[in-house]
Every structure is written in C-alpha cells, then in structure tokens.
C-alpha cells in the first residue's frame, strides 16, 4: 500500500511540474515573464539625442490603417510645435483612395469615400487645427523624399519618416531611400529618423532608427547618438513570407476576412505618438523597439542599454591637440574652411564668405565660423569639425555633477568653468565617465 501511495505522489509531482514548465514557456512567449524580469534588471538606459535642429519635417508614409489614426496625433504635435516656436512641417503620403471597406477599421467616414486618403486627412486636420499639411497623392520613393524635403537651415533639419505601410515592397522602398540618404548626406546639421509601424492580426511592432551601424552608438556622457535602422534591427521586415497567401492582401481586405483586428491599428498609432512625443517633446526616448500583443495584453520594449549598445570613447586629449594646431596665427593665412567644417564653404543664409575665428560657448572657447556679410555664425567642434555642440551634465568618478560642452558627433567634451555653469539647472543625460 505504501509503495502505491509513493508511486501516485511521484506521478502527481511529475504531472504538475510538466504543467508548470509549460506555463513558464507560455509566459516567455507572450512577454509577461520577460517584462517582469526587465523590471528586476539594473541596466543603465540611454536617451536619444540629436542636437537642436531649427526645422523638423515629418513624412507620414501610408494613410490607411495605422497612418489614418496617427495623422490626428501628428496634427496635435504640430500645434504644440507652434506654441514653442518650432518650425515643423507635415507631409502625408499615400497613392490610394478611400473605399467603403476602409470605413470599418480606418479613420475615415462615409462622406470621404472616393477622395485620396492623403488629401482627406490633410484637409480635415489643416482646417480643424489651423496648420499646414502637404498631401502627396503618390507612392513613396527616394525621389519624393529628395524633392519635398525642406531645405537645410543654419541649425540643421531633422527629418522623420513614419512608415505605416501594409506590404513588404513599400517598406523596402523606405529602407532603400533612407539608406541612400544616410550614405550621401553632406550637410552637417541634417539628421533623419525612420519609425516603422507594422502589425498582423492582433499584434504589431514599432521600431526606430537613424543609423547604419548594427548597434546603438553610446556616449560615456550618458546619451545615445545613433540607433540601427528598423530593417537592421529586424531583417525579417524586408522578407515576404510566401507560405502565407494573405501577404498579398491589404489590411482592409484582411479585416473583411476576419484576419485583422479592428483596433490593432489604433494601438499602433498610439505607440507612434509615444515615440514621437518622447523623441521631440520630452527628449527622453530610451527605447528602440516595442512589441504589442492584444491577445495577451503584453507589451515588451527593447531599451537602449550598455548590453545592446556600443560605447564610443571620448576623445578629449585628441581634441585638445587638434584645437592647439588650429589656433589662429595672424602671420599665417587662415586654414581652408572645408577642413574645419566639411561642406560649409559659404554662408547658408546669404551665400557670403565665411571667416574662421574663436568664440566663447558656455565658458569654453571653441572654433567658430562667421559670415562676413550678415550676422550668421556657427560654433564648431574643435575635434571633428562638426557643428553638433551642446551643453549637458555628467557624473564624474567622484560622484560630482559637472556641466560639459560636448560634441554629439565625435563625443569630444570640455568641462564648463564653475563660474559659467548653471548649478541650479535641470540634471539631464547623467552618466558616469569610465
């Protein structure tokens, strides 16, 4: 009898251990366990910084499922930009027209059936919010981006391309256009980000990137300057899964077949808004990807940390040597402007001649370019010649908060003199110099 009881208890133990193992696997797959473990992990996270551009251009590519709901968020973001005096320009791109089948899942009404999607959304929100939105009723291409991208301003232009497309071919066009742009960009202040939003029936993902390197580029000063483009993070974004016949159907057609949730696009548009507001308004974006599952209610984000990033060591000593070599000598002709700031051979405002000099930036003396014909001037990093200087905070090895002037491009930095620093200012981008 005792042996039978022990055998029964052993079988009962094996049964429940197997069920427990299966439950753990289920939690890992839907992201719940991963989310809980993430809270327990103590890893430094890095905010994405891109300087202080004078102009921002946002291209919404695809005005259907996710794009039609994201349009409202973009309009509100433009109103915010007006209140803070920021030059923000919106472009809605879509070649398609509104059909009856779109009314179930997309942000359109029956009175708009027959109109181009880009035009309907641009007209609606331009009138409602008193802003300017440019509708482009055509397919996206690299030529479209080059043609409609605003001209560079002295402080630089930040371009954000939001991909809300429902097929691999369109995403490939975006990837090729942005890759080509990054490989040929010449103006020092021009930056570009790609936010890709994709979804299936009840799950989707948001990815953001602005660089061609496979890992985020981290600064010891506590911020991130470059994130891999979405298709570098997830190569499968550009791969069509031929075994799934529904890949050739649009999201609206999938919805009519019951293969697409009526609310997944609203969820993806909300996450597009989260990324935009944290990137532009609060400037504390520390994520590079977010995965959403409406079936399980799970949301999992990939943060920019030491673990998945690549640290770019500061070049303070090299910068000082370069700055010494560039000190002006009245008996010698000034060095070529092109070696100081590549591409800057004439004033971007009036086309006048540029003169090299030195000026004070928050208590630190740096190279400066002046225009001989107007009031234009630009501070320049003495190490790499890029005009990506900013002031931030870091924590030294002794645990003291210190202000520095740093270059967002090469990570050169110089400590701000104590009498110049604003010790009562807000502490941002704190890190430890290693």
Image: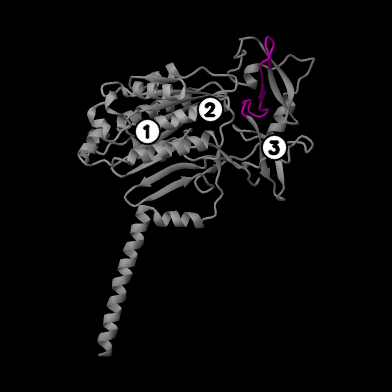
Local packing at callout 3 (Cα closer than 10 Å; few below 14, some 14-19, many 20+) is many
Q: Nearer the viewer, residue 165 or 219?
A: 165
Above or below, 246 relative to 346: below
Local packing at callout 2 (Cα closer than 10 Å; few below 14, some 14-19, many 20+) is some
Above or below, 250 relative to 141: below
Does 341 sit left or right of 129 as displayed? right
**Identity of the residue drawn at 74% across and 23% down:** 359
The disc, 2 or 1, on the residue closer to the chain's N-terminal end is 1
Which element is circle 2 on?
Answer: helix
**Identity of the residue drawn at 33% across and 58% down:** 26
Q: Residue furthest bottom?
A: 1
Which residue is identified by label 3? Answer: 404
The disc, 3 or 2, on the residue closer to the chain's N-terminal end is 2
Range of residues picked out in magenta: 370-388
Which residue is identified by label 2? Answer: 81
Q: Distance between the Cα atoms at labels 2 and 1?
A: 19 Å
Please tell me in which quadrant of the rendered image residue 128 appears. top left
Q: Nearer the viewer, residue 48 or 173?
A: 48
Local packing at callout 1 (Cα closer than 10 Å; few below 14, some 14-19, many 20+) is many
Q: Distance between the Cα atoms at labels 3 and 2?
A: 28 Å
Please tell me in which quadrant of the rendered image residue 173 appears. top left
- Mark 3 or 2: the one toward you: 2
Residue 69: assigned label = 1
Q: Position of residue 126 (x, y in %)?
A: 43, 22
């Amino acid at each position: 009898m005792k042996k039978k009881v022990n055998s029964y208890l052993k079988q009962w133990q094996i049964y429940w251990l197997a069920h427990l193992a299966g439950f753990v696997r289920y939690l890992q797959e839907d992201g719940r366990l991963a989310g809980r473990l993430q809270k327990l992990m103590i890893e430094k996270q890095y905010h994405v910084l891109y300087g202080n551009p004078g102009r921002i251009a946002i291209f919404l590519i695809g005005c259907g499922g996710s794009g039609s709901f994201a349009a409202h968020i973009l309009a509100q973001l433009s109103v915010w930009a007006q209140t803070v005096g920021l030059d923000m320009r919106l472009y809605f791109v879509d070649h398609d027209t509104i059909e009856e089948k779109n009314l179930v899942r997309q942000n359109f009404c029956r009175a708009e059936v027959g109109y181009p999607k880009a035009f309907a959304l641009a007209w609606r929100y331009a009138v409602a919010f008193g802003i300017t939105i440019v509708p482009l009723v055509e397919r996206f291409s690299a030529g479209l981006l080059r043609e409609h991208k605003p001209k560079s301003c002295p402080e630089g232009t930040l371009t954000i391309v939001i991909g809300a497309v429902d097929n691999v071919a369109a995403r490939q066009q975006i990837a090729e256009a942005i890759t080509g742009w990054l490989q040929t960009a010449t103006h020092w202040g021009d930056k570009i980000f790609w936010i890709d939003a994709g979804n299936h029936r009840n799950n989707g993902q948001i990815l953001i990137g602005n660089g061609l390197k496979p890992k985020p580029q981290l600064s010891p000063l506590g911020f991130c300057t470059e994130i891999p483009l979405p298709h570098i993070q997830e190569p499968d974004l550009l791969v069509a899964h031929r075994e799934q016949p529904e890949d050739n159907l649009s999201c609206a057609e999938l919805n009519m077949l019951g293969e697409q949730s009526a609310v997944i696009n609203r969820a993806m548009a909300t996450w597009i808004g989260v990324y935009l507001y944290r990137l532009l308004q609060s400037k504390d974006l520390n994520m590079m990807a977010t995965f959403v599952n409406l079936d399980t209610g799970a949301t999992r984000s990939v943060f920019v940390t030491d673990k998945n990033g690549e640290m770019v060591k500061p070049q303070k000593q090299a910068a000082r040597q370069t700055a010494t070599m560039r000190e002006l000598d009245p008996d010698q002709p000034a060095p070529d402007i092109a070696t100081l700031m590549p591409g800057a051979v004439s004033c971007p405002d009036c086309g006048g001649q540029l003169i090299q000099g030195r000026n004070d930036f928050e208590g630190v003396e740096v190279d400066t370019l002046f225009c001989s014909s107007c009031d234009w001037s630009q501070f320049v990093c003495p190490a790499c010649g890029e005009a990506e200087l900013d002031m931030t905070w870091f924590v030294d090895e002794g645990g003291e908060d210190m202000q520095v002037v740093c270059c967002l491009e090469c990570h050169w930095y110089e400590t701000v003199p104590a009498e110049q620093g604003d010790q009562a200012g807000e502490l941002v981008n704190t890190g430890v110099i290693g």
